[in-house]
Amino acid sequence: MSKLTHVDESGKANMVDVSDKEVTRRVALASGCISVSKEVINAILNNQVQKGDVLSTARIAGIMGAKKTSELIPLCHNLFLTDVKIDFDIDETDNKIFCQCSVTLDGKTGAEMEALQGVSISLLTIYDMCKAIDKTMVISEIRLEEKTGGKSGHYKRG
């Protein structure tokens, strides 16, 4: 079993010291989805949501969220992100909107939390902008898909 890195010898939470780690290129990809009504899908596709362009706003929110991860997750390091991309795919058959966030940086610690945060904030923004149409929306399946760089190397969901 691997040792928990955010817990000291006495069991107290602490920030991991990354001083001695090497700087490497780190890339993480996360995904998630929101299930919505057909009415929400149509409103988004026809740009008829009262609050404005849903996907453009959600994309910007996701980028901002990824950049602010260390302000919201207590033990995350403040990272200089070199790229954040948010993409959406609308499934009109199952009334779902899929979101992917990729994060790139050159640093001593990962990009996974930033990618997960980007997806989460993007999907929450869709919910916020469309809740007047449908309060039954469900955000789900937020997960890390792939990451490269760092001591633990390459991970890809199977």
Image (cartoon, rainbow, N blue to C red):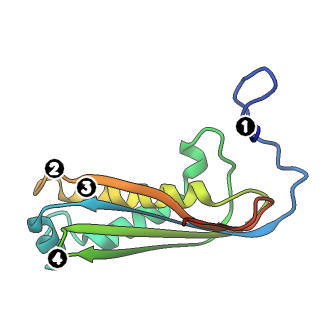
Confirm whether residue 65 shows in the render.
no
Q: CA distance from mark 1 to mark 4?
A: 46 Å
Q: Residues within 10 Å of mark 3 (few under 14, many from 20)?
A: many
Q: Which numbered disc, 4 or 2, marks the residue that appears first in the sequence?
A: 4
Q: Residues within 10 Å of mark 2 (few under 14, many from 20)?
A: few
Q: CA distance from mark 2 to mark 1?
A: 37 Å
Mark 4 or mark 3, which is nearer to you? Answer: 3
Residue 127 circle label: 3
Query: Residue beneath label 4, please?
Result: 47
The picture places residue 24, in percent across and down from the top left corner, at 80, 68
Q: CA distance from mark 4 to mark 3?
A: 15 Å
Q: Amino acid at mark 2?
A: Thr
Mark 3 or mark 2, which is nearer to you? Answer: 2
Count of labels in the image: 4
Q: Classify mark 3: helix, strand or loop.
A: helix
Residue at 53% in and 43% down: 72
Quarter holding the C terminus? bottom right
> Observer-nearest residue: 108 or 63?
108
Left or right side of 90 for 130 = left
Mark 4 or mark 2, which is nearer to you? Answer: 2
Q: Amino acid at mark 4?
A: Asn
> Observer-nearest residue: 50 or 150?
150
Mark 1 or mark 4, which is nearer to you? Answer: 1
Query: Residue beneath label 1, please?
Result: 4
Q: Which numbered disc, 4 or 3, marks the residue that appears first in the sequence?
A: 4
Instruction: Looking at this view, name the residue that lies furthest to the top.
Output: 10
Residue at 16% in and 76% down: 47
Left or right side of 31 for 23 = right
